[in-house]
Amino acid sequence: MEELVGLREGSSKKPVPLQELWGPCPRIRRIIQGGLEWLKERLFRVGEDWYFLVALGVLMALISYAMNFTIGRVVRAHKWLYREIGDGHLLRYLSWTVYPVALLSFSSGFSQSITPSSGGSGIPEVKTILTGVVLEDYLDIKNFGAKVVGLSCTLATGSTIFLGKLGPFVHLSVMIAAYLGRVRTKTVGEPESKTKEMELLAAGAAVGVATVFAAPISGVLFSIEVMSSHFSVWDYWRGFFAATCGAFMFHLLAVFNSEQETITSIYKTSFPVDIPFDLPEIFFFVALGAICGILSCGYNYSQRTFLFFLKANGFTSKLLATSKPLYSALAAVVLASVTYPPGVGHFMASRLSMSEHLETLFDNNSWALMTKNLSLPWAAEPDPQKLWLEWCHPQLTVFGTLVFFLVMKFWMLILATTIPIPAGYFLPIFVYGAVIGRLFGEVLSVAFPEGIVAGGRVNPIMPGAYALAGAAAFSGAVTHTLSTALLAFEVTGQLIHALPVLMAVLAANAISQSFQPSFYDGTIIVKKLPYLPWIRGRQIGSHSVTVSHFMNCALTTLAKDMPLEQVIQVVISTDVTQYPLVETTESQTLVGVVKRTHLVQALQTEPASWAPGQQPCLQDILANGCPTQPVTLQLSPETSLHETHNLFELLNLQALFVTSRGRAVGSVSWVELKKAISTLTNPPAPK
């Protein structure tokens, strides 16, 4: 259909489009359009990434806040039902247990029915992706809905199941970053770049942490420590910018909803500023760090061993393979029954949420001294002004409830990590570490009831400060990170204990990293995800190991002068994705790489008939357009194991060819590297 035209008034009968003729103020529209084009040009000069990073931070903050808002009301509804259902123990028990059982069963069934990759934490898989490994469909946007719904159901169980949202939010944020990256590529009109994609994914991981704790600085550092073996300085501004936007938006929503008067820390504390701690207390903080390090080794080992047991056991492995909702329901029944308040939960403050746990544990006052020679009755309902009384039981002292909490939650947390649902595992271990620190601080407050004398002044022991150090030290030891110290400062708004808390975290990490892999690395090992283990610096003989000791010498090469019959035979008998291309069969000089898909396509399209007397060879196919790639990086047989390991981690490589004076002599992939490191760590027994 021809475009309708009209005549501009006062013109020389020049036809113009009807849209322009009847559009309001065409000159103003042209000016506005020109201004927008000018603004777009200037923004692109600054860098086209920044507004995608703003969108990433704002979107994740909105999702995090909306989830907290909704879940908070669901949890309060469950508590109201538990209070109003009556005094009958059977009805109260059913109201306490059936609710989380139904939620976890639905969470497991719903998320697993859409995609199995939506279950679990998500951090081990993201860490694997950031090393360059492609996990099919893991970052597909269709997983987003399954993860959000499943995580909402998990968090709606409250402290009954005792799980958080950090890991799933990292996964959600990385999915959004991947989607925005694809939108950005189409908007800018540039070809897809693996490097650019990794930059946005790294920023997404930082935003995921920042929007959970509203802590942008520690969010970036934690994501770097946990999910990146090497991190480009160029990516810092992306991570900090997106994380700051997310954290600011999260705080802003809380202020607009009247949950906060102004932007403040999530778990606000009020430790004395004049003399927060005495010099002799540094020794106690280091000792607390050592205790957290030892306990973290036991926790990581037990959790990994239990996961292996579930996979090896016939009944549980079959249950997890065919009836995940049933396994989730059984685990939920056990955990909910233990936390039932009139029962065993009476001795472990089970009526408090994880947020309330931290608020009470960071209290300045010593509960042991406040309740000394007192017998406090157990209140029918928690007192909002004195939530710390939930840790005091008439039959047990404060020490009894704290010890009982540590013993019970140790195996309960391990059991909770095996449930196939979207869930985070960082906040529970953060709370667990706070209880360790609180117990340690209460012991010190009883040992030194008047405080420690230093410089002629007597300063009382603050158990809350030790709870802060314990939370940072234990969570840092479990995850092998130091940024948990900064996270503890950001969520509490306290920097006055920076030195002792950091020393406790260092002591805990020194022990845990020497004996056990981190929680997330252990999950990678159990799930058999591709990973490169560390090379311990003190490993005897590791520096003398070279590529010639562990490279794969069975290398299938294709020579340019190789007849097509041999080329076809090689392609049929092997299943590698690419072949090293050498100059001649005799010289074996490496000149490039040809991909299997390109070679098969070229062989299928090659004419069947050739000129009389002509013997077709690979060179003819290459000359007719079969693409090859140059080898920009290669190893020498004399390259050390450490240099090879650093190259693979720094450049996110999967395999490299080994050449000697230009001749292709072998290859090295993750398989050979892992085998070499394993041989050093666990040398074979002498025959």
Image: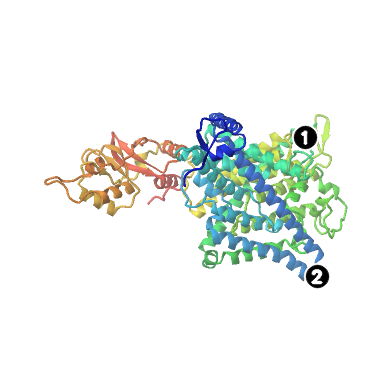
Coloring scheme of the render?
rainbow
> Quick check: can you spot residue 291?
no
**Quadrant of residue 396 in the image?**
bottom right
User: Which labelled disc corresponds to residue 276?
Assistant: 1
> Quick check: can you spot residue 266?
yes
The image position of residue 64, as x and y in percent, is: 66, 48
Q: Which residue position holds label 2?
A: 88
Left or right of 282? Residue 51 is left
In depth, the one of 352 and 72 nearer the eye is 72
| Among the two numbered marks 1 and 2 on one chain, the one whose residue lies closer to the N terminus | 2
Q: Please identify the residue farthest to the right as the structure is shown.
A: 374
| 621 lies above or below 347 | above
Residue at image location 75% in from the left, 39% down from the top: 264
| 675 lies above or below 414 | above
Q: Please identify the residue farthest to the left as the structure is shown.
A: 613
User: Which labelled disc corresponds to residue 643?
Assistant: none
Q: CA distance from mark 1 to mark 2?
A: 48 Å
Left or right of 523? Residue 340 is right
The image position of residue 425, as x and y in percent, is: 63, 51
The image position of residue 101, as x and y in percent, is: 66, 64
Left or right of 277? Residue 527 is left
In depth, the one of 457 and 115 nearer the eye is 115
Disc 2 residue type? Gly
Closest to the camera, between mark 1 and mark 2, is 2
Q: Residues within 10 Å of mark 2 (few under 14, many from 20)?
A: few
Residue at image location 66% in from the left, 58% down from the top: 153
**Secondary structure of residue under mark 2:** loop
**Secondary structure of residue under mark 1:** loop
Q: Residues within 10 Å of mark 1 (few under 14, many from 20)?
A: some
The image position of residue 224, as x and y in percent, is: 57, 39
Disc 1 residue type? Pro
